[in-house]
Amino acid sequence: MKPYIAVFKLRVINGLQYRIAALAGVATQFVWGFMYIMIFEAFYRGFSGTQAISLEQLATYIWLQQAFLYFLYLWLKETEISESITSGSIAYELCRPCGIYGFWFAKLIAHRLSGTLLRCAPILVIAFFLPIPYRLSLPPDPLTFLLFVVTLLLGLIVVISLSMLAYISIFVTMSPIGSFLVFSVVGEFFSGFVLPIPLMPIWLQNIVYLLPFRLSVDLPFRVYSGNIPTNDAIIGILTQIIWIIVLIAVGKFLLTKMLKRVVVQGG
């Protein structure tokens, strides 16, 4: 366990050095956040019926989305890992006295955590003081906030577990761009990043609920806003844990299988 903790700390410290890039990212995310809320506001005003999620809850959902973008966005990749697979430097990774799956897992968590620590606070603080309906609301009660934190952290593990499958696919495709393009397009749509799941048609929601993607984005953000009640949130946590076990088991199995077929040419 010590090697994984060591690489985690090192990657977090390195990631916290990119402050200028983080500030640029915050400005960009504010623009996108306002744009999304204004689009949905126009949609709500033109729709006479009631929606499964209120505009205030939706605004909170979007600001959380922007604040934790680096935490849960599926297109984010660690270039060092993908290059080690395509260039052959994975041979050095195989010489380490620790499992390569856990080593990469720690790297990916640290990468996302460091980026989020630099970006989330300014967005959350400013969004709390915006006028209604653009304001980021507080959770309904302390229990809801606690459930949000648990689902958010488990959502991160779900994202990393899914990302590991994308990295493993590079052993076959030898194309990081191709693997992550397909993975991110499918994953981000079904996770609720593009369109909140309550606004999707029922037939599409039924498909979404069969997949693990929504457990990374839709579940924690809707729990925070109060759109998902406490009992459903607890069921969601159990579902996250089950999916994490399945995804990690599948990932380890596939990685072991791929490493047996790895051929590194050259000296």
Image (spheres, rainbow, N blue to C red):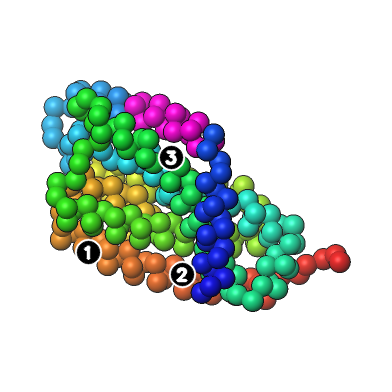
Residue 114 included in the magenta stretch of the image = no
Residue 3: percent from left, percent from top: 57, 70
**Split into 4 quadrants, where in the image is the C terminus?**
bottom right
Image quarter for residue 155? bottom left
Instruction: Tell me the magenta residue range.
Output: 21-36
Tell me which label, 1 or 2, sits earlier in the chain.
1
Asked whether the viewer can see residue 16, the reply is: yes
The amino acid marked with disc number 3 is Arg
Residue 22 included in the magenta stretch of the image = yes
Q: Residues within 10 Å of mark 3 (few under 14, many from 20)?
A: many
Viewer-proximal residue among 208 and 26? 26
Whether tag 1 and tag 3 are in contact, CB under 8 A, the answer is no
Q: Residues within 10 Å of mark 1 (few under 14, many from 20)?
A: few
- The disc placed on residue 235 is 1
Q: Residues within 10 Å of mark 2 (few under 14, many from 20)?
A: many
Residue 70 position (above or below residue 26): below
Viewer-proximal residue among 171 and 96? 96
Residue underneath mark 2: 248
Q: Is residue 249 left or right of residue 77?
A: left
Tell me which label, 1 or 3, sits earlier in the chain.
3
Residue 20: percent from left, percent from top: 54, 34
Give the residue drawn at x 60%, y 70%: 100
